[in-house]
Image (spheres, grey):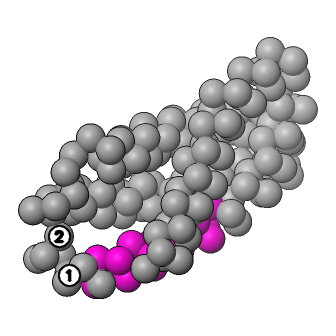
Amino acid sequence: MQILILLHILATVVWVGGMFFAHQCLRPVVLAQLEPPQRLRLWNGVFGRFFPWVWLSVILLIGTGQALVAIMGGMAAVAYPIHIMVLLGYLMSAIFMYLYFAPYGRLREAVAAQDWPAAGAALNRIRVLVGTNLLLGIANIALVFLLPMTL
């Protein structure tokens, strides 16, 4: 059980920490220092490196989360905050999958075609979705510490 919890926490750190860094630290600097073509190429490259880690994190979070719930007796046996955590985790995963297959796909295509307005629109959509997932991720982490995990 400790290994499952460790993997769950590490996957959370990678995904939520990566979103925080990208959204709150990297984005303002990139926006201030790079022109749109360089900025869009940079983000395309950053996402190309970060998103495989997010996929791994999503797989680990769902797998370890479901395993932990099963060990605790299933969804009927766990406290309501765990139900909320599961719901938020699946919502975050769905948002990421949409982000990956729709706006990120458009960003890659637009950068390859050097269509900077289309790339900028895709990047803005990604920014909003990452911001949303970041807030959901922080809320999910807060649940662990603010709500009782027992019935």
Residue type at mark 1: give it: Gly
Q: Are marks 2 and 1 in contact (CB under 8 Å)?
A: yes
Asked whether residue 58 appears in the rendered view, the answer is no
Looking at the image, is 25 positioned above or below residue 41?
A: above
Percent across and percent down for residue 34 are: 87, 22
Task: Judge the density around disc 2: few (<14), some (14-19), many (≥20) Cα neighbours within 10 Å.
Answer: some
Percent across and percent down for residue 141 are: 40, 47
Q: Which residue is located at x 72 percent, y 40 percent?
A: 119
In the foreground, 20 or 105: 20
Percent across and percent down for residue 143 are: 30, 46
Task: Judge the density around disc 1: few (<14), some (14-19), many (≥20) Cα neighbours within 10 Å.
Answer: few
Q: Quadrant of residue 32?
A: top right
In the foreground, 64 or 21: 64
Name the quarter where the N terminus is drawn: bottom left
- Give the residue at mark 2: 78
Please give left or right for residue 26 compared with residue 11 in the image. right
Residue 67 drawn in magenta: yes
Q: CA distance from mark 2 to mark 1?
A: 7 Å
Highlighted magenta segment, given as a residue range: 54-70
Q: For the residue labelled by badge 2, is the local secondary structure a helix, a strand or a loop?
A: loop
Give the residue furthest to the top: 32
Q: For the residue labelled by badge 1, is the local secondary structure a helix, a strand or a loop?
A: loop
Q: Which residue is located at x 52 percent, y 60 percent?
A: 9
- Give the residue at mark 1: 74
Q: Which residue is located at x 78 percent, y 41 percent?
A: 43
Please give left or right for residue 3 compared with residue 123 in the image. left
Percent across and percent down for residue 24 are: 63, 27
